[in-house]
Structure formats: C-alpha cells, structure tokens
Amino acid sequence: MHIVIMGCGRVGSTLAHILEDSGHSVAIIDRDPQAFRRLRAGFRGRRVTGVGFDRGVLTEAGVESAAAFVAVSSGDNSNIISARVARETFGVDNVVARIYDPRRAEVYQRLGIPTVATVRWTADQIMRRILPEGAEPLWRDPTGAVVLAEVAVNPSWIGTRVTDLELRAGTRAAFINRMGDALVITDDTVVQEGDILHVIAAENDMDRVNKVLAAAPEEDD
C-alpha cells in the first residue's frame, strides 16, 4: 500500500520507517525541509516539502493512489484540515489525525475523522502507573463512553470459565494476559492463577464491574 504521512517529527519519522520496513511505500510531508533529517539515510520514500492541506503538495505525495493518510504534525488545526482534504477532496477513506486537545478529538471523531488524542492517552498511561490497578483504562474511545480496562479478579474466580464470569459480572472480557502472553478467550477458557483480565465496558459501569470481580462470586441459588 501507499501511505502519506504529514509531519516528519518523531512520530511521523518513526511511523514512516515502520511502514517501509513492512513493505509499504511511503511519502512524508513537512513544511520544514530540515525535518527530513530524522529519516534514516536509506529511506526510500518521497520527501515532500509543504503543508499537508495544499492540494498540490498532496498530489506530489501521491495521495490520489494512497490507501491511507496520517496527519501527525504539531498543529491540531493543520492535522484536521489535512485529514479532511485527503478524505473529502481526494477520497482517501482511511485517515487518522493526531489531536492534542481531547475536546476537539471528540468532536472530530463524531464527524467521522478518526483521531488520536495524545494528551489524554499519555495522562491515562501515567495514571495507570502511579495509582492502583484499575484506576485508569488502557484505552478509551474519544467520546469517553467505552473503555478497555485491566481489572483485579478475586482469587475465588480461579477455575471459573471466562464466559461464566462474563455472565455473572455483566461485562465482556476482551483478553487475558497469562504469564506475559495475550490470550484470546474461547468458550473453554478458564481463569487461572496469575491471570490478568482485561474487560471492555461502558465507562460509567466500570465501578460496578471492578466491585463485582474484586469480590468472591456469588453462589447460585
């Protein structure tokens, strides 16, 4: 696939190298030609100097044949405008914009522009490390309505099938981390000692889910 990236900062240059190593063709745009120094000497992709919402610049970068467009410059406005031009003018369906302001990220997500709200994501990751487990989610959708969270499970749940745990706790299990490996849950998966359970749930339901799983399972009548 051909991928166009706007912004040759640390994120953009790293992404360009990863995509090229994965066999994709890459064009990277930046208004500052000095920014291309972040690219390794052997980078084979196109380097295009200019702004990512300029149609001529986008055409030079090959956006007309691009499978995806990524806007990761340092400016929220530039990123969202570029993403909209790529989608609405050139018909690129797969676009992603990095947005620093989480309030803007929610608005643009509702408009159909996938966003990565880096400030909120970084804050969540820090909170997870300085507060007890379960205090902050691993991931949340930009509206904040749905979260993926690591939850503490009472040892009394050991030996219980995860499907039964889901039913009793009223939640959906996403996966289990077992001895450092991510485990996809099947109908036969049973909770084992040391398992770290990750659930996906509504944000406003997480307190209840945490309380249910932190306690011993209730006996069936």
Image (cartoon, rainbow, N blue to C red):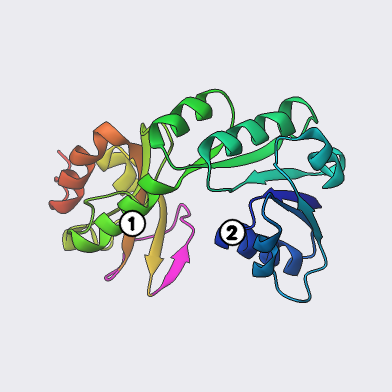
Region in magenta: 180-194
Specify the label residue 125 is tagged with.
Answer: 1
Q: SS class of the residue under badge 2?
A: loop
Residue at figure coordinates x 46%, y 55% from the top left: 185
Q: Is 79 drawn above or below residue 118 in the view shown?
A: above
Tell me which corner region of the image, top left, top right, bottom left or bottom right, holds residue 32. Answer: bottom right
- Marks counted in the figure total 2
Relative to the observer, which residue lies in front, 164 or 33? 33
Q: Is 120 drawn above or below residue 152 in the view shown?
A: above
Tell me, yes or no, if residue 214 can be seen here: yes
Image position, residue 45 (x, y; %):
81, 62
Q: Is residue 45 magenta?
A: no
Distance in Å between CA atoms under marks 2 and 1: 22 Å
Disc 2 packing (10 Å; few <14; some 14–19; many ≥20): some
Name the chief secondary structure element in magenta: loop
Residue at figure coordinates x 29%, y 58% from the top left: 126
Q: Is residue 35 left or right of residue 109?
A: right
Image position, residue 34 (x, y; %):
67, 63
Q: Is residue 66 left or right of residue 115?
A: right
Q: Is residue 95 left or right of residue 43?
A: left
Q: Contact (CB < 8 A) between labels 2 and 1?
A: no
Residue at figure coordinates x 59%, y 31% from the top left: 113
Going by the numbered disc 2, the residue's amino acid type is Gly
Q: Is residue 181 magenta?
A: yes
Q: SS class of the residue under badge 1?
A: helix
Tell me, yes or no, if residue 173 can be seen here: no
Going by the numbered disc 1, the residue's amino acid type is Gln
Residue at figure coordinates x 80%, y 31% from the top left: 90
**What residue is shown with label 2?**
9
